[in-house]
Amino acid sequence: MSKLLNNLVVIGIYTVFAALLLTTIYPLIWVVGTSLNPGNTLMVSKMFPDQPTIAHYVDLIRNTDFVLWFTNTLTIAIANAVVSTALVAATAYAFSRFRFKGRQQGLMALLILQMFPGFLSIMAIFVLLLQTKLLDTHLGLILIYAGGSISMGTWGMKGHFDTIPKSLEEAAYIDGASHTETLFKIILPLSLPAITFVALNSFITPFMDFILPQIVLRSSEKMTLAQGLYNMVATETNSSFTTFAAGAVLVALPITILYMYFQKYLIHGITAGADKG
């Protein structure tokens, strides 16, 4: 009886996984098929066209500002990855290795901040950027992303730092190393999975986000990919759904490649510090 029950549980688990896989793969295939559809509408009889064409990809690159949007987004993504990773690593190192007044309260504050969605502070962010003259600038958007990443990434990276034996640092201190030297020569090299996880998530955020760029960036020459592609289908006069689908495929392609390439680091980064907090 117990063996039958275990088999039913296994079958149920695989059924759920199969359903999740189907609901994930189906929209992807539909978007790819739509991007290769000769027409310009989403209403097609087949998921994949009989006569596929890459004309929409050519039109997207030649007749739109897709390259400009991509360049803007890539610039923001790289800067965000560098700044966010540096801030998260420094904050996590301080909370992991130093004992100071307000440490526990600070950690709790970072944990509580993760519970509130970012769009709740949009009005405050808008006013702040307006007063500091950073509205409609890529720098303003990067600072928002970098500041928001601290509460999200500090706990995970701190947990990984906690698993590194302090004896390694103590030996370095005996040899005359400073806290900065131990951070860059001992802690960070041993924390590559956690660093990769934070950096990759920070890099991908500008590619996926629409709300913040829409609020911060107003000039057409400063638009990100999400803004530019949205404007293709935002009004009733715009019906470039197939071109929009082509843009969605081109946006998803580099992100997918990055995730596949850094998969092993991401798995280690997600589980880093799980046994020690």
Image (spheres, grey):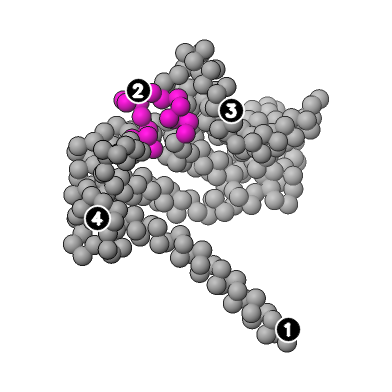
Q: How crowded is mark 1: few (under 14 residues within 10 Å), some or many (20 or more)?
A: few
**Callout 3: SS:** helix
Q: Distance between the residues labelled 1 and 3?
A: 53 Å
Query: Given the current orientation, which residue lies at the most extreme front position?
Result: 236
The residue range painted magenta reads 211-228
Q: Residues within 10 Å of mark 4 (few under 14, many from 20)?
A: many
Q: What residue type is labelled 2?
A: Ser
Question: Can you say whether 91 is above or below 247 in the image?
Answer: above
Q: Which amino acid does label 1 sit on?
A: Ser
Where residue 94 sits in the image (x, y, percent)? 70, 30
Where residue 225 sits in the image (x, y, percent)? 36, 37
Quadrant (top left/top right/bottom left/bottom right) for the N terminus: bottom right
Question: Can you say whether 44 is above or below 159 in the image?
Answer: below
In primary-sequence order, the first of circles 1 and 2 is: 1
**Callout 4: SS:** loop
Query: Given the current orientation, which residue lies at the most extreme right position?
Result: 101
Q: Do the residues labelled 3 and 2 touch (CB within 8 Å)?
A: no
Query: Given the current orientation, which residue lies at the most extreme bottom position?
Result: 1
Quadrant (top left/top right/bottom left/bottom right) for the C terminus: top right
Residue 243 highlighted magenta (yes or no): no
Tell me, for residue 121, which label it has, or none.
Answer: 3
Which residue in the protein does label 4 denote?
Answer: 36
- Marks 1, 3: nearer the viewer: 3
Tell me, for residue 219, which label it has, or none.
Answer: 2
In primary-sequence order, the first of circles 4 and 2 is: 4
Where residue 169 sits in the image (x, y, percent)? 71, 36
Tell me, for residue 2, which label it has, or none.
Answer: 1
**Side of 122 where 66 appears, left or right:** left
